[in-house]
Amino acid sequence: MERVLGIGGYFIRAADPAALSAWYRDCLGLDADENGLWRQGAGLTVFATFETETDYFGSRVQQTMLNFRVRDLDAMLAQLRAKGADVAGETQDMEGVGRFGWVTDPEGNRVELWQPA
């Protein structure tokens, strides 16, 4: 059986694609090239499904949520707050999994940040 090799891309509709791309570059350090290619660091990727009624993604209108691995969650959240980003006040710890925090991008998409255990 053929299998997928990994995530090949994540695509977001935006009222201002250039501004949203700049936000991800300037606030999260996602240094994609002019074609959107980004060489991410090696590590785990989680694929999980959630119940329709979940509030985990923030708004129920949001059908998917992007999750980025980070080295230091507290430093990333402080950096985002310093840039005026909409950062959730709470974080979550999951024993054996890691720590989680959330930011909402300028288009209203909730993004999860994960510091693996």
Image (cartoon, helix red, strand yellow):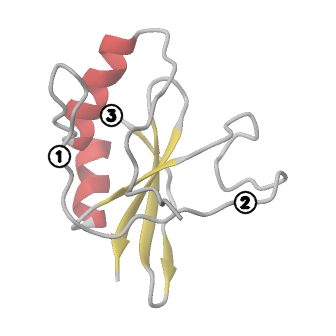
Which residue is located at x 64 percent, y 49 percent?
57
Secondary structure of residue under mark 1? loop
User: Compared with residue 5, is residue 28 higher up or lower down, i.e. above or below?
Assistant: above
Precedes in sequence: disc 3 or disc 2: 2
Residue 36, image x, y percentages = 25, 27
25 and 12: which is toward the camera: 12
Would you call the spot at circle 1 few (<14 residues within 10 Å), some (14-19), or many (20 or more)? few
Residue 59 location, quadrant? top right
Residue beneath label 2, please?
A: 50
- Residue identifier under label 1: 39
Disc 3 residue type? Gly
The disc at residue 84 is 3
Residue 104, horizontal then vertical, whole percent: 48, 38
In percent of the image, x 61 and y 43: which residue is there?
A: 64
* Front-most of residues 67 and 72: 67
Q: Amino acid at mark 2?
A: Phe
